[in-house]
Image (cartoon, grey):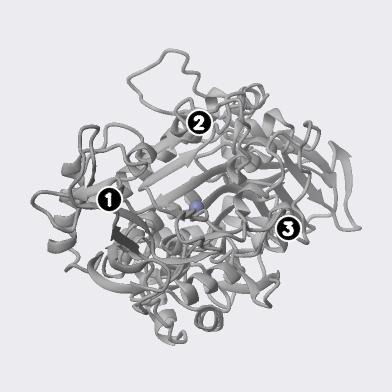
Amino acid sequence: MAMEESSKQTRLRQKSRSWIMVFVAGLVVLGTSAPAAPIADSAAGSKQAAAKKASAAVLPSLPFDHILPYDELTGLLRAWASARPGLLQLESLGRTPEGRELWFATVTNTTTGPASEKPALIVDGNMHALEWTGGVAAMNFLRRLVRDYGTDARVTRLLDTRCVYVLPRLSPDGVEATLREGRVIRSVARGGAGGAPSAGLRMRDLDGDGRIVFMRFRDPNGPWKRHPREPRLLIARGPEDAGGDNWRVVPEGLIAGFDGGSISVLPALEGLDFGVHFPDDRGPGAAGARPAPDSALVPEVAAYVDALRKRPNIVTYITCHSFGGGLLMPPVNPDDPFPQADRLIYAAFAARAAELTGYHPTSYLDLRAGQMTDIHIPTEIGWLYSVHGIFAFITEFWNPLKAAGISLDGPMSLWLGGYHPVEDELKLLRWNDSDLGGAGFVAWHPFQHPQLGPVEIGGWDKVHYWYNAPFDRLEKEVAPHADWLVFLGLASPRLEIRSLGSEPVGEGIWKVRLVIDNTGWLPTNGSQRALDIRGVEGVVAELSLPPAARLVEGELRRSVGQLAGRNEQRSTATWWGYNPGTPDRAVVDWKVAAPAGTTLSVTASHVRAGTARATLQLK
Ligand SMILES: [Zn+2]
């Protein structure tokens, strides 16, 4: 539809080019009165930026040598918001069961228009409590935005023309528990339906070093034996191995209901997983579909879903997790809709991510590698893409295997499940010794266990070196991802008024012409999926007349459909199926009766491509 429209419009434009050019100079883009103009990439702009920066309140930096406890996080967010009031608005989406606020930041230059009138990118962190690196990445992006606005041309353009939402810590209660207890918690330690089993080994720091690692102890029927050359390493006993010095390994902890012999280990990932509590990706009509999060069980998710639904300007969504060093995208389940147009856009976005971060992009479905595909997996990215047509990604930061120089041929889950050569284990220990200064692998040391007797405590510190990037390389790990987020934000559609002009066509009669461009890379609808589910209406052009003026021809409010972006333009060397034109542009004409000197105003708006305004004096 946009194509048909555009060829007609191109002809119109060519016929009256000189006519249109007259008024461009007179074009005024409305906004709230601006105390500081948006900063351009010009010398004057940089000077202005420097002045602005100098006058702005000091911006406290983000520490990377520890994970911020809730109070410190709150203090930092408040300090950033008060240092950059025209840029960062901080609000709480609600309170957690333990009484913490769910901080939500809206970042945009408010002098160029409100957030709701700009295309948006949304980023969250710490949906999973122990995945601290994801939360740090969200905070680092926020810092990058407020710190670099006015000095970095891309960040400046992003916040002048788009809006960014950041929810840095979706589970403040969960993160606090992991910081306090140093153990693996999924999202929150609150029990789900059924509660946690009461008997079994529960992970706990026994030797008081603040870390939960492993315990090994001699057992004639233990399945492990020492590596012949590396005493720290235990290797599996083979089918023919009998007798010898055998060991058993269990996580560091105490055994509830211990009978003196058998040990069952409680699941490592304790608690609820917020990720599976988002609305169903098959839509509310699907059999067994959950229409909305349970606000009693997961109030954090319920508040977040409400916030997402109230922001129809969201084009792209990224949830920051760790670990794996990968980027996950739809499809998630075998029968998920995934039109070709969106596949290509996802591929372009993922390629840029890979270039910047080195992370491996893959679909969630491919990650499942054909395993249990008859089971429907609910995910937030599945819901946002399938039900709302929002480009949704999961970033899994940090890959310790890659850091240790191990390359994988198969899925990482297989490797982690223990299917890998002993040589990889030795490589990891060498990496610990040379790169981590020995801090990643706790040296085995004797401990008198109250239930098991003499044991040795030691092994990999999964919390600080596997689930998360070590503090000394944390900033380096998350920095390139912020660049990618800026890129994604700038790829969104954006309506701009190219021109608004008038021409007298009779006594007190004027022809008014509005030309609208989508200057973004994506089409105004964002995704094809958004169109397929009728999730977005077309661009609406609206003329406002003062009492002295009257409409003679046309409609005051006109829908001009979707406008294309530049995303389909790939190479001038190919021409197959290439139909150039101006599918990114719409021309709207009105005929108005009014005295000369009358001022008219127009608005071009689209829920995902933003709102542009202009005024015109008839003359
Ligand atoms: Zn996660």
Q: Image point 35% across, 40% down: which residue?
A: 412
x, y percent for residue 326: 38, 44
Q: Which residue is mark 2?
A: 365
441 and 221: which is toward the camera: 221
> In the picture shown, does residue 611 fall above or below 94?
above
- For marks 1 and 3, give the CA distance: 52 Å
In this view, the mark in front (1 or 2): 1
Quarter of the N terminus within the rendering? top right
Could you classify mark 3 by the number of other residues whose Cα lies within 10 Å: few (under 14), some (14-19), or many (20 or more)?
many
Could you classify mark 2 by the number of other residues whose Cα lies within 10 Å: few (under 14), some (14-19), or many (20 or more)?
some
Q: Which mark is residue 220?
A: 1
Is the shortest distance between ligand 1 and the CB of mark 3 under 8 Å? no
Q: Which residue is mark 3?
A: 302
* Local SS, label 1: loop
> Taking the image as drawn, is residue 506 in sight?
no
Based on the displayed image, in which of its 4 quarters is residue 354 positioned?
Answer: top left
Label 1–label 2 contact, CB within 8 A = no
* Local SS, label 2: helix
Amino acid type, residue under disc 2 in the picture: Leu
Q: Image point 53% across, 74% down: which residue?
A: 176
Amino acid type, residue under disc 3 in the picture: Ala
Amino acid type, residue under disc 1 in the picture: Pro
> Taking the image as drawn, is residue 348 in sight?
yes
x, y percent for residue 125: 52, 60
